Image (cartoon, grey):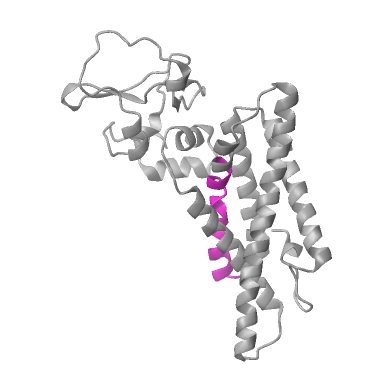
Amino acid sequence: MGTGGRGGLRPGKGSPEGVTAGKGNPEEVPATPPAAAPSASCQYRCIECNQEAKELYRDYNHGVLKITICKSCQKPVDKYIEYDPVIILINAILCKAQAYRHILFNTKINMHGKLCIFCLLCEAYLRWWQLQDSSQNTDPDDFIRYAKEWDFYRMFAIASLEQAAFFIGIFTFLWIERSIATKKNPNFVLLLKALLLSSYGKLLLIPAVIWEHEYTPLCLRLIKLFVLTSNFQAIRVTLNTRRKLSFLAIVCGLLTESAMVHFFRRMEWDIGSDCTVYKSQDF
């Protein structure tokens, strides 16, 4: 699949922003490799071994480009810079660590907030749809329509709080574990961006609702599993940690989210008197 996506290294192919940002010095052709720069200037990562790198490729005169070779593993620092975006997306869907490192470390993506809002809107719509589907009131009165509109806003707020609880559980576990094991706190900003990007699977909720069929509950559970798997891989790649630690972080996040859900049930904020709880499907 990887070789089928190759089209020769050229600026603007594959991940344009990552390639441009990873450019070497276009004006000079060094006879020998430059001296190693301090770690602060190493803003890229090798997608194979996760070692830091100064650049993704070297731009020689007359547009001759050469992918940088990692000094640690002797493989290309980032082969995905010459891949089509579709190939990169497919590899990300397959949860390949190399694709995640390319997206998280070697590209400049600034859509975390927009993607988060859109995913929350999808989740709120699913909850609101289940809420309306369980209601037998068909009165077209304006007051009823107004109440249903506020139900959607309420579902959005609850979905936001539950996702925040999920992230807080993950961050708390990792902060405690890293404080004890390595005495060094993880980069929570980068981890938050990674978790937001890896939650893109929630966008599948809308098609699952639109094309409703008897297997819709199963589809919702599979989407939930896919999102959790993506979050797991994002934690593992961002922190370069073991699978066991990433799994425990996800479990801790789920426990915190479940506590939040239980709190809402007790307060009866997420349900009406005649509707089915969204979490009852536990998708």
Q: Look at the image and tell me in which quarter the N terminus lies.
A: top left
Q: Main secondary structure of the magenta part?
A: helix
Q: Is residue 209 above or below residue 234?
A: below
x 32%, y 10%: residue? 33
- Tell me, yes or no, whether the highlighted magenta stretch contains residue 199: yes
The answer to whether 29 appears left or right of 90 in the picture is: left
Left or right of residue 217: residue 78: left
Which residue is outermost to the right? 266
Which quadrant of the figure has residue 213? bottom right
Residue 219 image position (x, y, % from top left): 63, 59
**Residue 18 in magenta stretch:** no
* Residue 135 sits above or below residue 240 on the image: below
Q: Residue at x 41, y 24 (%)?
A: 77
Determine the residue positioned at 45% across, 44% down: 89
Q: Nearer the viewer, residue 66 or 61?
A: 61
Q: Which residues are magenta?
A: 194-213
